[in-house]
Every structure is written in C-alpha cells, then in structure tokens.
Image (cartoon, rainbow, N blue to C red):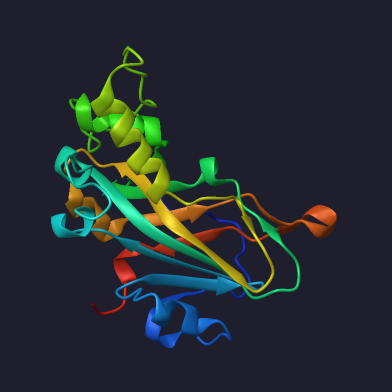
Amino acid sequence: MRNSYYSRLRGLAVTIPLAGVLWSGASVYAQNGVRGAAVESHEGLTISATPWTEASKYKEKFPKKSPYAAGIIAVQVAFHNDSDDSIKLELSRIRMTVRLDSENTQELPSLSAEDVAQGVLKPGAKDPTKRSRIPLPVPVPRSNGDKNFVELQRQAQEASVPTGVVAPHSTVQGLLYFDLQNQFDLLETAHLYVPELAFMRGNRPLTYFDIDLGQRGAQ
C-alpha cells in the first residue's frame, strides 16, 4: 500500500500547463505542435508528456495494428535540456503510477518495442485495477519469420524515444508505452515518474520528475 507518491523533497520542481512554462527553449514545443501536455521543469531540464488518448493519433506510426486498440497507451514525451551539460536518462526506469483507490497506487513499467508487439498480437494480460502488482510481460515464443511481429516491433522502436542522452540546448522526443489494459480512465490520476537523471559532467544527479498527467494543458 502507498498513501502518497514520493516523499523526497522536490525543491522548486513544479507541474504546470504548457502555456505557463517560462524557459528559453519553449518555442521548440510550439514548433512541434505539442499541445495538451503536462510539463515539469527544474535544474535546466524540461519534460513534457502528452498521452495519446485518441485512436486517430496512432494511425501514422501504426497504420495496421494499433497499441491503443490493445489497451496500451502511448505517451509522447519531450526532454529539453537548457543547460550547458549533457543529461543522461535511464529510459528503462521510467514508470507510470496510477491511483487504484484512496490507499493504493500501482507502478507500471514502460514497455520495450518487443513488449508492445507482444501486447498487441498476444493480448490478455491482467487487469491493472487489481491490487496485485502487474508482472513484466513474458516474451511470446515466435519464429524469426513472424512478419507481423517484426513489423510492429520496428514501428514501435522507430516511434520511441531514440536515446537516453540529451545534449546541451537540445531536445529529444518520442513515445513511451504503458499497458493499461484498456483502463484509460486511470490516466485521470496518473503520474509519469522519471528517476535516475544525471548531468554527465561529474555524474551529478538531478531531482526526479513526477509529472501529473491529469494536469495537462488545454487541447
């Protein structure tokens, strides 16, 4: 059981609608049409997160089989580094936390491209509203000639965040995937938790990000 999210002191970190973000690289998001995003900014790093909650959003990246139809939500994220040092991200450590009831939250791991292909082609995982922890996906046995699997895995990989290093004064963006098993109403209480960030010079850690996805700006 967990009565709150994370108790570590967060300093000046805030979660605010995109329109209120005041940083020198804000035009990057405007130019790329990132709207309705939840945004948090501190220590020179700004992260925006936009869950894709409409089936039409997936058609360009996934023209044949959509993760959304299989209960998987894609979250478009952008990492903007406004500092003079490169920042390292541990993409595999990013989690989505959802509130199941007043006393319980659940951490969902971000899915790999292989996990996404498996979830779309082999649906039927557990209900995330149950109190037991959701296990990581178990790889589905397949042959190298499974063209549907290979194609879907490639699509998911090409659309995902391409690197875990954000160079100074630059932006890295792409999709993260989370298996909600069609329980998309859980997004109303969801947070995107981004831990284990560090400046590469001297390996200096940054405060984690805990972005409230329920506080997204207007579409």
Where is 26 relative to 5, above or below?
below
Farthest residue, direction right = 202
Residue at 17 percent across and 38 percent down: it is 70
Residue at 30 percent across and 65 percent down: it is 214
Could one spot residue 2 in this view of the protein? no
Question: Which quadrant of the structure image shows residue 83?
Answer: bottom right
In front of the other: 160 or 215: 160
Q: Position of residue 9 (x, y in %)?
A: 62, 63
Where is 120 relative to 30, above or below?
above
**Quarter in which the C terminus is drawn:** bottom left
In front of the other: 41 or 65: 65
Where is 109 relative to 30, above or below?
above
Residue at 55 percent across and 73 percent down: it is 41
Q: Is residue 141 left or right of residue 40?
A: left
Q: Position of residue 1 (x, y in %)?
A: 39, 39
Q: Is residue 210 left or right of residue 166?
A: left
